Image: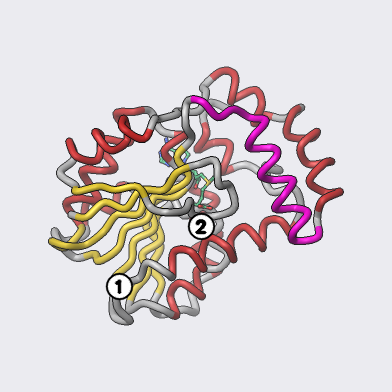
């Protein structure tokens, strides 16, 4: 396993149980839905992962474009949502085929930590191109330099306790500590950004950014930014 895309394409155990996975995607979908500007809006989710609750996001918008680089994962997502005419599934390369100014809301959630800084710059420029003037990019789950793995574990334990999978969380944390995740975290690493660093990056890509009041998802130690094109 070479990188994080391989990791997410594999049968990994990042979700400690089915209950965790379902609660995670329900929470993300609810949070994303809160940012949809209009019922006919076009929403693009960059590196959507399993996107298990995408039907709920699609219900609140006109079209949902799910994009995912990991090929097996992408095929699974395409099969899962093939019955929903509002949902399209694309590779990251296929974003180049989307028209300028054709998207109202772009979401990059829990992805920046896995990208090199220059990959993130490229993605921000691509999102700026596809967004309509006044459209918004939601950049979520940014890891800060001063917050380490222990705070992540604590946030997951609290989420597990709230949703009834605390024991699975404890077992899952031990399993993760012994897994490819730990190995990749040490070899490839996770990118972290301060608030000012990410604001600068978004400005350089042409956005008018601000920090959102709360992070998307369950980890309050991470940051979400809202950037207007
Ligand atoms: C933690 S999952 C997040 C999925 C989803 N956005 C969510 O919020 O649940 C990380 C995602 O980042 C993608 N990813 C990993 N490395 C990447 C890279 N270098 N460039 C783009 N996407 C990447 C993975 O394929 C996976 O879909």
Say whether residue 184 is left or right of residue 163.
Answer: left
Residue topped by disc 1: 37
User: Residue at point 26% right, 43% down?
Assistant: 124
> Looking at the rendering, which quadrant does residue 176 occupy?
top right
If the image is split into quadrants, where does the C terminus sit? bottom left
Image quarter of residue 228? bottom left
Q: Where does the image place residue 210, in percent across and percent down from the top left?
A: 29, 48
Q: Which residue is drawn at 69% across and 45% down?
A: 156
Q: Where is residue 220 in the image (x, y as percent from the top left)?
A: 55, 47
Side of 59 where 6 appears, left or right: right
The foreground one among 89 and 100 is 100
Q: Is residue 83 above or below residue 166?
A: below
Q: Give the range drawn in magenta.
A: 146-164
As rendered, which of 135 and 85 lies closer to the eye?
135
Disc count in the image?
A: 2
Taking the magenta stretch, the answer to whether it contains residue 43 is no
Q: What element carries label 2?
A: helix
């Amino acid at each position: 396993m070479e990188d994080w895309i391989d990791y997410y394409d594999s049968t990994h155990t990042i979700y400690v149980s089915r209950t965790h996975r379902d609660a995670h995607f329900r929470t993300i979908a609810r949070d994303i839905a809160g940012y949809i500007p209009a019922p006919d809006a076009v929403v693009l989710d960059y590196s959507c992962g399993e996107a298990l609750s995408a039907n709920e996001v699609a219900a609140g918008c006109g079209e949902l474009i799910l994009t995912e680089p990991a090929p097996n994962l992408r095929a699974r997502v395409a099969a899962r949502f093939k019955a929903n005419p509002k949902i399209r599934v694309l590779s990251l390369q296929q974003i180049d085929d989307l028209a300028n100014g054709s998207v109202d809301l772009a979401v990059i959630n829990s992805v920046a930590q896995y990208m090199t800084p220059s990959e993130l710059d490229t993605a921000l420029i691509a999102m700026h191109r596809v967004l309509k003037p006044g459209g918004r990019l939601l950049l979520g789950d940014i890891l800060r330099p001063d917050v380490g793995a222990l705070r992540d574990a604590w946030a997951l334990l609290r989420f597990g306790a709230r949703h009834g999978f605390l024991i699975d969380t404890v077992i899952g944390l031990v399993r993760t500590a012994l897994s490819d995740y730990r190995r990749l975290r040490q070899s490839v690493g996770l990118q972290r950004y301060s608030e000012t660093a990410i604001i600068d990056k978004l400005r350089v890509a042409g956005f008018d950014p601000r920090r959102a009041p709360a992070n998307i998802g369950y980890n309050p130690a991470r940051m979400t930014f809202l950037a207007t094109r």
